[in-house]
Amino acid sequence: MPTTVGGHIELGDVTPHNIRQLKKLNSVVFPIAYTDKFYKDVLELGSMAKLAYFNDLVVGAVCCRVETEGDKHRMYIMTLGCLAPYRRLGIGTALLNHVLQKARDHGNIDNIYLHVQINNEDALAFYRKFDFHSVETKEQYYKRIDPPHAHVLQKDMRGCMTAAEPPVPPELSTNVTDTDSMD
Ligand SMILES: CC(C)(COP(=O)(O)OP(=O)(O)OC[C@H]1O[C@@H](n2cnc3c(N)ncnc32)[C@H](O)[C@@H]1OP(=O)(O)O)[C@@H](O)C(=O)NCCC(=O)NCCS
């Protein structure tokens, strides 16, 4: 575990000017290579995609989307990650809290879900803290990584649209700012 030091966490928009930083970050954080189409689509996500800055350095990012089927709306987290040296500093929490806030702002999100490789203990522990639980295991979900299986983690949002989320640890004296300007 890294030694924790105080720092300033800020979330910022993904734009054509910084999309290459998102690509670079994702290439380091995830074992999967995302396509050019993925990044083209990210630029259309508005505030559903965010970069996380720690003391002005890009160290994390989230990309999610709303999926609608009939009158049911869900949010899907496509990517949420943080560079290894900056983990356990509350950056993942800041990114996930942004997703949860977007779900509350929407007002009619049934649940939030994502796929996690079955051996990704860090992510499983992280999402467990936020009351995500496995609703399904998809065999052979990934084509090029081993193990290829994924848990589908889900958090029910019905009845918790105003619930408080775990705060960033106070001992970090960390300020979280969301420079959301796309809404
Ligand atoms: C999962 C991930 C995003 C967590 O980011 P993070 O910035 O380290 O998370 P936080 O510092 O906000 O952690 C919040 C809490 O989650 C839990 N947690 C996070 N990582 C954990 C780990 N490795 N082991 C146990 N608990 C963990 C802890 O309860 C932690 O609180 P604490 O540090 O006060 O104990 C990060 O490990 C990561 O980027 N992993 C690679 C990408 C990935 O797998 N993403 C998930 C699929 S989209």
Image (spheres, helix red, strand yellow):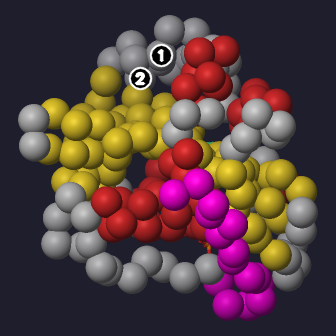
Rendered image: mark on residue 90: none
* Extent of the magenta region: 169-183
- The foreground one among 164 and 4 is 164
Dot 1 and dot 2 residues touching (CB under 8 Å): yes
In the picture, measured across the screen, residue 46 lies left or right of residue 137, that is right
- According to the image, label 1 marks what residue? 142
Residue 120 visible from this viewpoint:
no
Task: For ligand 1, give the image quadrant.
Answer: bottom right
- According to the image, label 2 marks what residue? 149
Can you name the residue that lies furthest to the top here?
A: 143
- The structure residue drawn at horizontal position 42% and vertical position 61%, both measured from the top left corner, is 102
- The structure residue drawn at horizontal position 55% and vertical position 26%, both measured from the top left corner, is 41
- The structure residue drawn at horizontal position 67% and vertical position 31%, both measured from the top left corner, is 30
* x then y, percent, for residue 129: 44, 67
Residue flagged by tag 1: what amino acid is it?
Tyr
Q: Dot 2: few (<14), some (14–19), or many (≥20) neighbours within 10 Å?
A: some
The relative height of residue 5 versus residue 100 in the rendered view (above or below) is below
